[in-house]
């Protein structure tokens, strides 16, 4: 059957139209100011809370592909970014949980919006001027806010190389689903059971409290 008859120009118009519709450039990363800024930097009431079900969130690997995380273990997610000085100061504590509970709890660092980019305002400030953290200046940490997943990947790779962090790093997507739905904070953490219930939500990651919750979760699983 001749779909386009003897007119080759129709075929080329069809081919260009279909290729153009199916081949889209990298999605632009959305940017917004955290609602915590309007709440005196109190992030506790934002997003999902303890006892609720974790919503369906798209994560990406360092290859830029959407991934489905295994569901046989509880999960600990901790948000962070290359320019987040708070997260950088807690990487050793996060790594210690990753190492201690490897095989029992799947621990992930979720790379989200940059906290203190050098080229634009911070998602944690209403000031349009860049908010350069003092520790970043001292440590020579500078980076621009990624606008595409590729740029977020490059910065995550740099974060891993420079810090030597052992905890697996995954990426929030271009719509920042994790950041928006979990709590719009730079260093938040959630512990999630195997059935998707949030066991503990922290607006700021705190190792001792999180470890106690993890141990309690194991005791509960053993009792069952």
Image: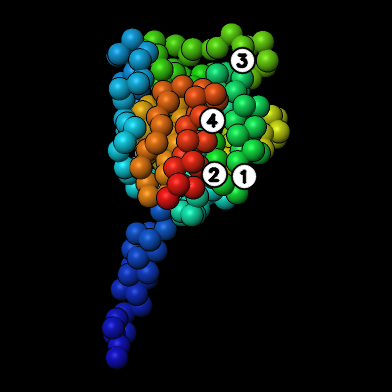
Is 135 above or below relative to 34? Answer: above
Residue beneath label 4, please?
211
The residue lying at 41 percent from left, 17 percent from top is 124
- Cα separation, mark 2 vs mark 1, equals 6 Å
Mark 1: few, some, or many residues within 10 Å (few <14, many ≥20)?
few
Along the line of sight, the residue nearer the viewer: 146 or 16? 146
The residue lying at 31 percent from left, 25 percent from top is 46
Q: Nearest to the eye among marks 2 and 3: give it.
A: 2
Q: Secondary structure at mark 2?
A: loop
Mark 2: few, some, or many residues within 10 Å (few <14, many ≥20)?
many
Along the line of sight, the residue nearer the viewer: 128 or 190? 190
Q: Are marks 2 and 1 in contact (CB under 8 Å)?
A: yes
Q: Secondary structure at mark 3?
A: helix
* Percent position of residue 3, x then y: 28, 83
Residue beneath label 1, please?
102
Q: Nearest to the eye among marks 3 and 4: give it.
A: 4
Quick one: which residue is furthest to the bottom in this view?
1
Q: Earlier in the sequence, mark 1 or mark 4?
A: 1
Q: Secondary structure at mark 1?
A: loop
Q: Name the image quarter holding residue 81.
A: top right
Looking at the rendered image, the quarter that the N terminus falls into is bottom left
Residue beneath label 3, please?
136
Q: Nearest to the eye among marks 1 and 3: give it.
A: 1
Q: Which mark is residue 105?
A: 2
- Cα separation, mark 3 vs mark 4, equals 28 Å
């Amino acid at each position: 059957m001749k779909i386009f008859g003897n007119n080759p120009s129709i075929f080329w118009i069809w081919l260009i139209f279909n290729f153009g519709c199916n081949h889209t450039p990298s999605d632009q990363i959305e940017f917004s100011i955290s609602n915590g800024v309007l709440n005196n930097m109190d992030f506790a009431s934002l997003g999902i809370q303890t006892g609720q079900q974790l919503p369906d969130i798209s994560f990406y690997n360092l290859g830029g592909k959407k991934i489905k995380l295994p569901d046989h273990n509880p999960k600990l997610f901790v948000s962070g970014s290359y320019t987040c000085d708070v997260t950088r100061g807690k990487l050793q504590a996060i790594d210690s949980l990753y190492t201690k509970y490897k095989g029992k709890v799947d621990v992930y660092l979720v790379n989200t919006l940059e906290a203190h980019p050098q080229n634009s305002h911070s998602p944690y400030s209403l000031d349009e001027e860049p908010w350069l953290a003092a520790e970043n200046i001292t440590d020579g940490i500078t980076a621009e806010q990624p606008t595409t997943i590729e740029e977020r990947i490059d910065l995550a790779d740099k974060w891993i190389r420079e810090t030597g962090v052992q905890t697996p790093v995954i990426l929030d997507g271009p719509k920042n689903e994790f950041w928006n739905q979990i709590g719009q904070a730079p260093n938040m953490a959630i512990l999630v059971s195997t059935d998707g219930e949030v066991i503990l939500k922290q607006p700021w990651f705190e190792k001792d409290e999180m470890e106690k919750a993890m141990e309690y979760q194991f005791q509960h699983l053993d009792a069952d």
